[in-house]
Amino acid sequence: SAVAITGCACSRTKTQRRHAAHFTFQPDPVPSQYGPTQKMNLFQSITSALDNTLASDPTAVIFGEDVAFGGVFRCTVGLRDKYGKDRVFNTPLCEQGIVGFGIGVAVAGATAIAEIQFADYIFPAFDQIVNEAAKYRYRSGNMFDCGNLTIRAPWGCVGHGSLYHSQSPEAFFAHCPGLKVVIPRSPIQAKGLLLSCIADKNPCIFFEPKILYRAAVEQVPEDPYTIPLSQAEVLQEGSDVTLVAWGTQIHVLKEVASMAQEKLGVSCEVIDLQTILPWDIETVCKSVVKTGRLLISHEAPVTGGFASEISSTVQEECFLNLEAPISRVCGYDTPFPHIFEPFYIPDKWKCFEAIKKMINY
Amino acid sequence: QLSTALSNCFKCDLHRLEEGPPVKAELTREQGLQYYRTMQTVRRMELKADQLYKQKIIRGFCHLYDGQEACAAGIEAAINPSDHLITAYRAHGYTYTRGVSVKEILAELTGRRGGVAKGKGGSMHMYAPHFYGGNGIVGAQVPLGAGIALACQYQGNNQVCVTLYGDGAANQGQLFESYNMAALWKLPCIFICENNKYGMGTSVERAAASTDYYKRGDFIPGLRVDGMDVLCVREAAQFAADHCRAGKGPIIMELQTYRYHGHSMSDPGVSYRTREEIQEVRSKSDPISMLKERMLSHNMASVEEFKEIDIEIRKQVEDATQFATSDPEPPLEELCNHIFSNNP
């Protein structure tokens, strides 16, 4: 017998219904410089990048859990049929093994694209990434390297993921010289940045905002193209406050920038960092020199989150330009909660409040 | 009706064991009705969770146990409440057999303050005294189980730790580390692989170089058991517990079982197996039907009695649902509570 939910005399019917997403995806204009484009969502733009790679690089292989049938987020759909089961194959359930194996493949000269099913599961592979992949070139005096390795993993909050399907672990890897860490905000960015990671001669970790897999749709070039790593992008110019984020949070900040303009007459400069490591210090500092105020926002917990690195460097470089203390609007220092997700995430209201405080400092 | 000795446990496959559990099992009427009640409660609770999930009253991830009830019921029948148990994320059945009420389980699924983890854990994180969850990361619970067994040995309390994992987790490196430590130090750890033939959508043949999970501990003795027969599970678990309590060290049990649902509520469960296969198991090997038929054919209980039990359970689950859908959510203060110990 069905439970009569409408008859339930609860004043909490509002909270029982999940809120709509905390952001609205804002597509970029259609790029004209890369040739014909096609409507693609984020997972399709990833597939396109991988398709281009397998077509042009005969050594390229893709492996991970469930990638053969297309992957749990459909990023590898069709690739096994097109390129063969020796190039797109499943691994058993063993992250440490997947990355270790990937390092070996890369060192031996093939282009290895390893998938970790959720960034939350990457920790068994942490030792391989930090102690093996990142240090291979350095410890061998450049005789060997695993630059051919790219690790992809779904990342970030998704509305119902809770502790183990929502994490943003970029800060753990930012602490490791030898790695590159990249996070796209959209399909156009994702394809270009992923292709750059694959081409880059250093081991790269590419985090894909899972909440955008279906929600983000743009006109994406069909042919391969690259977007440079370690170059932050100024998405909109402003004069009063610099806003820095990456991935999903960019779309939150874009909305915050509109709110600030409308309600406070405050002009915000929005920067997508894109590459977390090595990050584009110059672009961010140049902006802060202009505006005098900086707000950094990410879902990951605030203590030790990557905002702390940016904040520290900016105050070193731009101390005398600052009009207010640097603001970090981030996740709280708790595990990513199950029931409390809407309260936990750094939503537009929290960011807006932070801007108000900085302006009135 | 008096107790009846039943001889229908199949011989188990053995690894490094001279002899296995007895092939004859004795079942009293009381025991039979209790096992029936336990399994039927878990079954109805899981089906209710399915319903609530489809109504979007339960959100997040939800992995249902229907089909595998004989494993949880049989193991609990063989161990003591003072023994320990840890499992992975398909944990609602064990949460119940380890003593948590249906009410507290459903309320945890719906994220309410009356839930067993105060609404903060959800489906994969339910706990009870001597029951350590409920673990989301595949295989991570196995070294923990070996550690709990070490504590039992250290404290000399004659308790054992039942450490469960699935056929997917069987390929994780940390299991082999656990096997080595447990064997080296003769820990009272019963490793149990619930082999339900599929790790998410990957069949065992495609994931494992050896699907003889009871042998994967190599130097650790093992046995493979029909996990759909609650009596077989009980006898095997009893045998394993005796082995550990006698100080012989760890043992591995493989329970061959089956889940009717897909991996989780987002998996329809029919893209990697046929509906015919699922139907076949339901009609020929359903643990609850098998026990009921056995008891009826031995005149240990009547059809009416089973019907009465079913009605009682249905009411119990409905009452629990009522609670789980009306209890308030945890207060916002709980967001930052229990990060660290509360005593500064």
Image: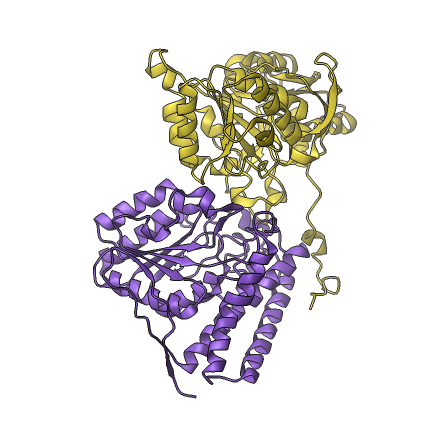
Q: Is residue A14 above or below residue A68?
A: below
Give the colour chain B carries in the figure. Answer: purple
| Quadrant of image for the N terminus of chain A | bottom right
Q: Is residue A311 visible?
A: no
Q: Position of residue B55 (x, y in %)?
A: 68, 57
| Quadrant of image for the C terminus of chain A | top right
Q: Is residue A121 visible?
A: yes
Q: Is residue A288 left or right of residue A149?
A: right
Q: Position of residue B111 (x, y in %)?
A: 58, 55
Find the residue positioned furthest to the bottom.
B1
Q: Which chain can be seen in yellow?
A: A
Q: Is residue A360 above or below residue B93?
A: above
Q: Position of residue B207 (x, y in %)?
A: 45, 42
Q: Quadrant of residue B32?
A: bottom left
Q: Nearer the viewer, residue A180 or A12?
A: A180
Q: Nearer the viewer, residue B89 or A237?
A: B89
Q: Nearer the viewer, residue B140 or B35?
A: B35
Q: Is residue B145 above or below residue A40?
A: below
Q: Who's the residue at 43% across and 54% down the image?
A: B195
Q: Position of residue A283 (x, y in %)?
A: 60, 13
Q: Quadrant of residue A76?
A: top right
Q: Is residue A82 left or right of residue B33?
A: right
Find the residue positioned furthest to the right.
A262
Q: Who's the residue at 61% across and 15% down the image?
A: A226
Q: Who's the residue at 60% across and 73% down the image?
A: B314
